[in-house]
Amino acid sequence: DIQMTQSPSAMSASVGDRVTITCRASQVISSHLAWFQQKPGKVPKRLIYAASTLESGVPSRFSGSGSGAEFTLTISSLQPEDFATYYCLQHNSYPYSFGQGTKVEI
Amino acid sequence: EVQVVESGGGLVQPGGSLRLSCTASGFPFSTYWMSWVRQTPGKGLEWVANMNPGGSEKNYVDSVRGRFTISRDNGKNLVYLQMNSLRAEDTAVYYCTKGGHLDYWGQGTLVTVSS
């Protein structure tokens, strides 16, 4: 099974900061990676698929990059509504697996 | 508008069974993979199972294989998760999701396994 490791697990940031979250796969997964955002008490929402393709309606301050086994989610200028937990998901091989999450706090 | 609505959660004793249902609308259901994902209270996400549009391919995470069964009724836009031999560690919110790559999520239904 493929293990997904996110770093950091939690971070403190301020409005306007550039934020980078890393997701590492235990095996090569090509670009079969998605990023999700979950706000407290809310349902996860997909932000990015195929490692770097922005979901329709997602602000352009979000971007994804990487391929192979290392990926990053970048928020270019953190906004108040971006404080949430972010998860990566590999869908290269079964069983699909999520990272443990990165909580972005004020 | 895409809608995915889960039902069937509740309290069940260890070793018991429960069937979750998911009603979908707003997209051509019979052409989409459907998936189940769960989230334990206060913890992370775990992919549970998915099924192809025709129902001929089903995939499961190891921890539920042999106990859970995913199925669908394309005529009624329904997907099910039959859960047998439930354990305390199956306690979670279960989400039904559109697509094999989880592009849209329902609100979830809580399953609690406890005596």
Image: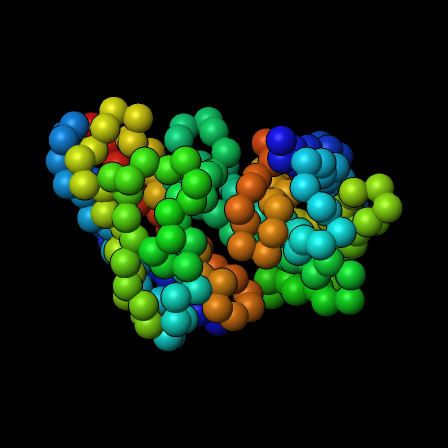
Q: Position of residue A83 (x, y in %)?
A: 29, 31
Q: Position of residue B80 (x, y in %)?
A: 76, 47
Rendered position, B43 above or below B57? above
Rendered position, A73 above or below B8? below
Residue drawn at x 52%, y 43% is B39
Among all residues in the image, which is located at the extreme right? B75
Rendered position, A52 above or below A46? below
Where residue A38 sits, quadrant-wise, is top left
Residue drawn at x 52%, y 42% is B40
Q: How is the image coloured?
A: rainbow
Residue drawn at x 23%, y 28% is A79
- Foreground residue, A38 or A51? A51
Confirm whether residue B48 shows in the render. no
Among all residues in the image, which is located at the extreme bottom? A28
- Does A36 sit left or right of A93 as displayed? left
- Does B111 sit left or right of B72 as displayed? left
